[in-house]
Image (tube, grey):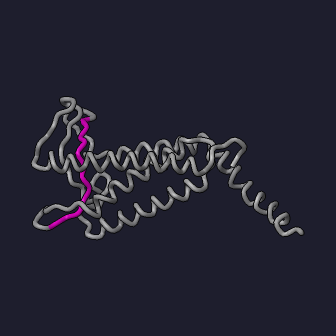
Amino acid sequence: MTPNAPSRRSRILLAAAVAAVGLALDLATKQWAWETLRDGTEIAVIDGVLYFEFGFNTGAAFSLLRDAGWARYFFMAVTLGAVAYMIHLARTLPTRWPSAFVAIGLITSGALGNLHDRIFRAMPMFGKIEHGVVDFIKVYYWPGKPWPTFNIADVNLVLGVGLLLLYMSRHGEAIEDADEAAPEDEGAAAPASGAG
């Protein structure tokens, strides 16, 4: 940690707070969509642009692998791997800049929100019970051309990944310098601890 840099504990608490708020918002809005929109109700927020409409995605983004029986477990494993990597970043990235930890929180909340649905959300589809993710935000980027329906978890993931990429592009050299300096610091400390 560089002089005057915030403590890692405070940065991890920041990431945890962002993750908790993002996850709570995602789960609350999905529950609202489940109870309000599942019967086919459509709510026009901005006519011709933004609608709330129920969707149930058994695949990933853009319904990728929607019909593959093993897809649910694959995406659950990928999600757990992504969360583990976010924990690793929270424990190793320099604490000087808060944006990385906000990004970690956003990505974690998005990953856990969709993981929750893959574990707990199920409904009958095509004659059988299917697990999937609740989507409800529908945006038309062109008249008659909607973007695939998404949810707050997806928004958190996109914002988090974008913010993390921006952080890496602006501070990548500082991160590399910190990584290179760490072994030297450990090596310098070793003789002192053994001297006596």
Residue at point 36%, 50% (across, down): 23
Q: In front: 6, or 100?
A: 6
Left or right, residue 32 beside residue 174: left
Q: Residue furthest top?
A: 47
Between residue 127 and residue 96, name the one nearer to us. 96
Q: Position of residue 161 (x, y in %)?
A: 46, 47
Q: Quadrant of residue 65?
A: bottom left
Q: Position of residue 110 (x, y in %)?
A: 38, 51
**Number of marks in the rendered image:** 0
Majority SS type along the magenta span = strand
| Residue 48 location, quadrant | top left
Q: Position of residue 19 (x, y in %)?
A: 43, 49
Residue 134 among magenta residues: yes
Q: Quadrant of residue 47?
A: top left
For image coordinates 24% across by 59% down, the residue present is 132
The quarter of the picture where the C terminus appears is bottom right
Residue with the most extreme front position = 196
- In the displayed structure, 84 sits above or below 93; it is below
* Percent position of residue 31, x then y: 23, 50
Indicate yes or no whether the magenta region holds residue 124.
Answer: no
From which residue to which does the magenta span run? 129-140
In the rendered structure, the answer to whether residue 186 lies left or right of residue 57 reads right
Residue at 66% across, 43% down: 5
Asked if 133 appears above or below 119 in the picture, the reply is above
Write the residue at 47% across / 50% down.
16
Q: Is residue 193 above or below residue 106?
A: below
